[in-house]
Image (cartoon, grey):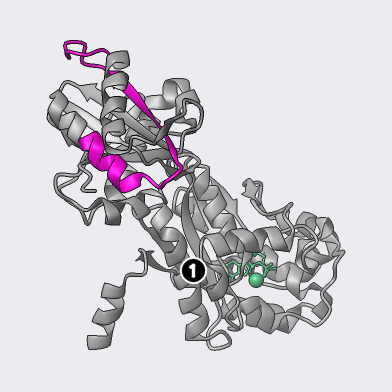
Amino acid sequence: MKYTEIMVRYGELSTKGKNRKLFISQLAQNVKRVLSDFPAVKIHADRDRMHLLLNGEDSVQIMPKLEKVFGIQNFSPSVRVEKTMPAIREMVQSIIQSAYQPGQTFKITSKRSDHDFELDSNELNRELGGAVFEVFPEIAVQMKKPDINIRVEIRKEGAYLSYETLRGAGGLPVGTSGRGMLMLSGGIDSPVAGYLSMKRGVEVEAVHFASPPYTSEQALQKAKDLAAKIAPYAGSIQFIEVPFTEIQEEIKRVVPEGYLMTVTRRMMLRLTDTIRELRKGLVIINGESLGQVASQTLQSMVAINEVTTTPIIRPVVSMDKGEIIEIAEKIDTFELAIQPFEDCCTIFAPPQPKTRPKLDKAQAYEARLDIEGLIARSIAGLKVSEITELSEKNEEFSDLL
Ligand code: ATP
Ligand code: MG
């Protein structure tokens, strides 16, 4: 079926009162961005629906992209035909011929927003039902949950027919909740935390700590590849690489083993908060899950979180590992995340970090560090890049270089 339009239904948007206009225009902007490879597509965003006029672009390529845009409840590809009964009948018959499997039921749901049209919606239902029986006399009508629901909408510009509805990603349009800094490691949890906060409308920038030569080029690339996996939900992601080698060496030199992890985390959080201010973010997001490892006990959170009053969002804090993995598999970050490249924490991690660190001790050991100087030097070496979806085109291109 050659579709000419896609009708998009909004999700939670509809409950947003005054912000509604803002949400709809952000959604339209996000849709436009993910469809930038399809320049002929025209977007019309109304109060209740968004219509994408395909103008010859291929719906088969466009639909998987739409499935990743937050703020969309569902969408239906449709065909536009001339607003005459013979043309509509013919299209209904061709739809049923391609959709029908023996034993299935159907119904016609007509809607007439152009009241000048010759038939009303009841008459349309009857007439077009008849057209279906002409093709498959044995087919049964079912009003509640039919297998095939052919929707017909008579509008000023033409008649629109659709029968498929695809589920959207739900959530809120990315950008409508403001900006947050995602602490992105190379693990399973933080990409999931990033995805979940994007789902609630947060525009995410990824902050990644790298400690070369202790951490490898592959470990850095892995974090970038993970960012690329969640980038399609936003169009693109800013990736901020933070030099962390000097800080780790200094901590290792002056802090006793039991507090290496706590002090390291405090420094990471301070840096992330400084970057957040520079980048005009509102919150910090991380992939901590309660009780998963020593740094993720409540006592650790108390001792680490103390360096900032900035809200820290922990989308996976109450999830079991299995639940997090389920999402990681859904968003295709799991396979990448389990590749064994050492990250900065694993290399400097003591065999037995304290699971109940004391805040006053952490502060006392930390006083041995030149915190301001260390942070200033790290910030001076930030590397920001824009990450978009991994595309085969790019990979081929880099082979040629
Ligand atoms: P993940 O699977 O996200 O790596 P984890 O269960 O391995 O999490 P930790 O390694 O203790 O837990 O890290 C806890 C959180 O700290 C991570 O989810 C991430 O948000 C942040 N984090 C850890 N290492 C880094 C890093 N190298 N760069 C940026 N953030 C990091
Ligand atoms: Mg980790």
Residue 183 visible? The answer is no
What type is the residue that disc 1 sits on? Answer: Leu
Residue 117 visible? The answer is yes
* Occupied quadrant, residue 267: bottom right
The quarter of the image holding the C terminus is bottom left
At a point 22% along the width and 22% down the height, the residue shown is 154
Element at label 1: helix
Give x and y (percent) for residue 9.
39, 33
From the viewer's perspective, tell me whether residue 324 is left or right of residue 148: right
Residue 94 is inside the magenta segment: yes
> Which residue is nearer to you in this view: 71 or 29?
71
> Which residue is nearer to you in this view: 76 or 370?
76
From the viewer's perspective, tell me whether residue 8 is left or right of residue 82: right
At a point 48% along the width and 42% down the height, the residue shown is 201
> Which residue is nearer to you in this view: 378 or 69?
69
Residue 347 is inside the magenta segment: no
At a point 82% along the width and 74% down the height, the residue shown is 353
At a point 41% along the width and 26% down the height, the residue shown is 20
Residue 239 vs 35, above or below: the answer is below
Residue 161 vs 200, above or below: the answer is above
* Occupied quadrant, residue 156: top left
Residue 51 vs 267, above or below: the answer is above
Q: Name the residue under label 1.
A: 226
Q: What stretch is highlighted in magenta?
A: 91-120
Give x and y (percent) for residue 250.
66, 80
Give x and y (percent) for residue 174.
43, 44
Total of numbered circles in the picture?
A: 1
